[in-house]
Each structure stands twice: as structure tokens, then as C-alpha cells.
């Protein structure tokens, strides 16, 4: 019959009183008092001693099995989150116990209180890998526009507003250079999407909320080009408007 966790823990304590061959972080062959290190895959003796902040000591087995008690598990999860060793959304018992097991084994090796060991890990810059938290970072989408694409945007607007495309003389002018720089900045800004966890007021449940902030659109670039062209070449724009008006009048009169 399989042993219960309490029976297992009692046996570990009994072995602790009669066994002197295991030290901190040592490895044992007795499978009943050993745990698999989730990092190395090796068996770690459950009899390795871990010093506590109150001056007492406990075995690796005591601390790992003790974490299965709900109150202890909640305290451990809070400490792991506070020290950046697991994410705030991690609720899986297996994930919490696996992280705690690594802490206990490390604390035994370093001969430190587990909670002090977590604090030292955090102070040393350890924590979750970037891939584990990347989902919470803002995402920026940059559109691929070549120089020819950017020039075409301005050229099309110029053709519409003043009846001719961008000339070589225009390209040498400061207004054109400034306009192209402005459009390039719009493109490089891209579209930024930020996702954060919020509470749904209707359901009361947490959900991911994404907010998208567009930094570029072809319409926005065309509007900037029209403003720049009207300001830089008012005579050409006025001439085009007169020609268009005259054409409209002639067409109207001819249609009567």
C-alpha cells in the first residue's frame, strides 16, 4: 500500500535522527528520502539540512513535503511572486512546488534560510526568463515601406493638389526633406499594442485587455504631405484650383 504524505514525512524525520551520512545538498540512494532536482534531473537527498531564520534547521524533505499544506503553499507562492521567481498569474500547484523545490535545494547548498535565499536571488538579478514575461510587454508593429513607397505617397498627393508630381527641384527643398523625415518617423513609430490584465466588471473575472495605438497610416501620411505642399507651393496649388474650376464651369455650361 502506498504511503501517505504524513507517513512519508514521519519516516524522513525518523531517518534524520539516525542518519549522519548526509550533508547539505548531498545526494542519497534511498529513494524514500530523495527528490529529483528539477534543474539537473539528479536525485537529491531529502536529508540535506536547511538552516532557518529562527536558528533551527529542517531537512529538504521536511520543507518540500510541508509545502503541500495549503497555508504553507499560499505563503510560499506569495514569496516566490514577491521575489520575481514566478509570475503573478501562476496558480498551478505543480509550478509553485517545483519552484519551491529549487529554492529549498539551493538554500541547502548555500546553507541559507529559503526566504533569505530567495531575496538574495532577486538582489542578484535572477528571476523569470524574458520569454516568460514577454507576453506582458507592449508589442510594436512596424510597416515595411521603402524609400520609393514613401516618395510615391507624396508624389500622388502632389499630383492631386497641384497637378504635377514631385520634381527634382522639390527634392532639394527643405520642406520636402522635412516632410520625408516626418513620414519616416510615423512609419518607425508603428502601431503599439499594450495588453494588461483587468477585471471584467460584469463577470468579476480577470481577462486580458489589449489597447492598440496606431502611429502610422497612409491617410495620416497623405494629410501631412498635403499640408506641406500647400504651404510650400501656394501658387501651384492656386493655379491647379483655377484650372479645375474653369474645367468644371465649361463642363457645366456645355451640359445645358
Image (tube, rainbow, N blue to C red):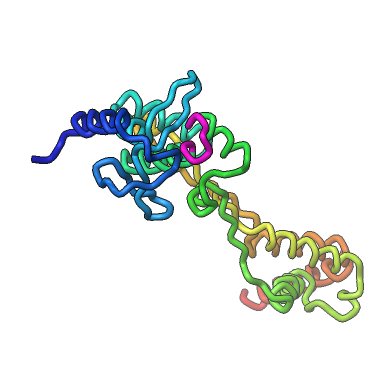
Q: Which residues are magenta?
A: 107-114
Farthest top residue in view:
54
| Residue 197 seen in the figure | no
Q: Position of residue 201 (x, y in %)?
A: 38, 29
Q: Is residue 137 shown above or below 224?
A: above
Q: Is residue 36 shown above or below 21?
A: below
Q: In the depicted view, which residue is nearer to us: 63 or 109? A: 109
Q: Main secondary structure of the magenta part?
A: helix
Left or right of 224 on screen, residue 39: left
Q: What residue is rendered at 30% in x and 49% in y?
A: 29
Q: Position of residue 51 (x, y in %)?
A: 47, 28
Q: In the depicted view, which residue is nearer to us: 243 or 18? A: 18
Q: Position of residue 177 (x, y in %)?
A: 86, 68
Q: In the depicted view, which residue is nearer to us: 216 or 239? A: 216
Left or right of 9 on screen, residue 48: right
Q: Position of residue 14 (x, y in %)?
A: 26, 29
Q: In the depicted view, which residue is nearer to us: 239 or 152? A: 152
Magenta stretch containing residue 109, yes or no? yes
Q: Is residue 103 shown above or below 132?
A: above
> Split into 4 quadrants, where in the image is the C terminus?
bottom right
Q: What residue is rendered at 59% in x and 50% in y?
A: 213
Can you tell which quarter of the image residue 75 is in?
top left
Magenta stretch containing residue 75, yes or no? no
Amino acid at each position: 500500500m502506498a504511503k501517505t504524505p504524513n507517513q512519508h514525512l514521519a519516516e524522513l524525520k525518523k531517518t534524520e535522527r539516525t542518519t549522519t551520512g548526509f550533508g547539505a545538498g548531498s545526494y542519497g540512494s534511498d529513494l524514500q528520502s530523495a527528490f529529483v532536482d528539477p534543474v539537473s534531473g539528479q536525485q537529491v537527498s531529502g536529508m540535506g539540512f536547511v538552516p532557518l531564520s529562527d536558528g533551527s534547521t529542517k531537512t529538504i524533505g521536511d520543507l518540500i513535503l510541508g509545502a503541500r499544506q495549503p497555508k504553507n503553499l499560499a505563503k510560499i507562492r506569495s514569496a516566490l511572486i514577491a521575489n520575481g521567481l514566478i509570475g503573478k498569474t501562476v496558480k498551478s500547484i505543480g509550478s509553485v512546488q517545483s519552484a519551491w523545490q529549487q529554492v529549498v535545494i539551493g538554500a541547502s547548498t548555500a546553507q541559507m534560510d529559503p526566504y533569505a535565499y530567495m531575496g538574495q536571488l532577486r538582489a542578484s538579478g535572477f528571476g523569470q526568463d524574458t520569454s516568460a514575461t514577454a507576453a506582458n510587454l507592449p508589442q510594436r508593429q512596424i510597416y515595411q515601406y521603402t524609400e520609393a513607397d514613401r516618395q510615391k505617397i507624396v508624389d500622388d498627393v502632389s499630383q492631386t493638389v497641384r497637378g504635377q508630381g514631385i520634381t527634382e527641384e522639390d527634392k532639394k527643398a527643405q520642406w520636402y526633406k522635412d516632410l520625408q523625415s516626418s513620414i519616416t518617423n510615423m512609419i518607425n513609430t508603428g502601431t503599439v499594442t499594450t495588453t494588461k490584465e483587468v477585471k471584467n466588471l460584469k463577470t468579476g473575472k480577470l481577462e486580458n485587455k489589449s489597447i492598440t495605438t496606431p502611429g502610422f497610416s497612409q491617410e495620416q501620411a497623405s494629410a501631412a504631405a498635403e499640408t506641406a505642399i500647400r504651404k510650400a507651393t501656394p501658387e501651384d496649388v492656386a493655379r491647379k484650383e483655377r484650372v479645375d474650376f474653369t474645367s468644371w464651369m465649361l463642363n457645366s455650361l456645355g451640359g445645358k
